[in-house]
Image: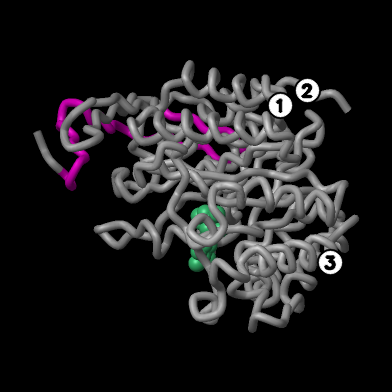
Amino acid sequence: MDITRQGFAVTKKQVLIGRRHFLLGMGSFVGTDALAIASRYGHGKNPIQVTAQKSRDFSVAENTPLRNRAAAKGLIYGAATQTSILRSDTKFATRFAQECAMLVPENELKWKMLRPSLNSFDFTRSDWLANFASKNNMFFRGHTLVWHKSLPEWFKARVNSQNAEQIMLKHITTVVKHYAGKIHSWDVVNEAVFPEHGRADYLRNTPWLKFLGPNYIDFAFRVAAQADPKALLVYNDYGLEHSTPNDEAKRTAVLKLLERLKSKGTPVQALGIQAHLEGEAPFNTKKLRAFLKDVADMGLKIMITELDVADNMLPKNVLVRDRLIAGIYEDFLSVVLDEKAVIAVLTWGLSDRYTWLRDRKSRKDSASVRPLPLNAHMERKLAWYAIARAFDKAPKRGF
Ligand code: XIL
């Protein structure tokens, strides 16, 4: 056995890479030999089999962009991006407008960027994005109102249990009203669940919890609903996708939170599943499907809000890696889009040139990461074809 890196073992027998036949010209992908990689997940336990056959077909019929393919099924496809990127890279901006029907500010609506001080708001950058979205006939989406990260420098010194409620109220009211009528949905609360913190209610220890108690979530949703009764109000979280023990626990905990909120009449209307997928981690299709159904049965919509596939544990060979990543995109989305409560798929970035994973999950061999639908030159990768195929196969939603 050849241990290529910690937690990822590949035997020579298992890796059968023969002649490569790639035909990407008309969007078709043709290969021959089979590649099988056995990886070990979780310190040598639970060996899983990731297979990516070279013969797997990632072809699609037309050149049609993702936004149109999604729209044909009553779905929305979009991505997160940043003002500075769209302003400086016109090629990227053009491709973004072609492929996306929804724009999510990657950072511009977080407290750190929006709140220079306790008593001021700076909407310059987020307004620029809202305008770009509207000029290009795209939905605009809000991320995020209440989170324990991306808080400004002044937060720690200025916010306490006496004033936290007032500060949260003012923040949500001001920001949500600013975009009322122009926004599709808001991630009202982000990442509030973290079973590892050991609380009976599974909530994460955050400044908001410390200052306001567990009711801060309900409060945030009520304030948002009052400020804009039309925007779809979303609870957004990560770690809900794989069949690892942590993700299992997280699914249970998030369901419990949503049930608690619904029973109190909290105006939460959708679950945002971030879907920062890990290339080497296992899925359980049945469990994922059941989770989506449980959420849908509560009367909630579902959005895939931050989809990307981390490839830092995958083999270096780009052809092999792209095929594995594409397989994960198509397999994941096929399950997810089968659930009619799912209304949108958003990737966290569009091109590998601009991805948070470059810093967050860089590769030990220092090869560039390739987690997104377009490569660094704005060309469609197999991941793009995989997403396109999933949209083409998806059942049509009611209009
Ligand atoms: C990330 C951005 O992509 C980075 O640019 C920033 O430095 C940190 O935040 N979950 C979320 C997103 O809800 O807001 C995060 O975005 C990625 C994880």
Q: Which of 229/317 is in front?
A: 229
Provide the residue span drawn in magenta. Answer: 4-31
Q: Please tell me whether residue 24 belongs to the stretch shown in magenta.
A: yes
Which image quarter holds the N terminus? top left
Marks 2/1: CA–CA distance: 11 Å
Dot label at residue 178:
3
Amino acid at the residue labelled 1? Ala
Amino acid at the residue labelled 2? Lys
Q: Quick check: marks 2 and 3 in contact, CB under 8 Å? A: no
Dot label at residue 341:
1
Q: Considering the numbered disc 2 on the image, is that residue within a helix, a strand or a loop?
A: loop
Q: Looking at the rendering, which quadrant does residue 336 occupy?
A: top right
Q: Considering the numbered disc 1 on the image, is that residue within a helix, a strand or a loop?
A: loop
Of badges 2 and 3, the one in the foreground is 3
Residue under numbered circle 2: 396
Q: Considering the numbered disc 3 on the image, is that residue within a helix, a strand or a loop?
A: helix
Q: Main SS of the magenta segment?
A: loop
Q: Residues within 10 Å of mark 3 (few under 14, many from 20)?
A: some
Amino acid at the residue labelled 3? His
Of badges 2 and 1, the one in the foreground is 1
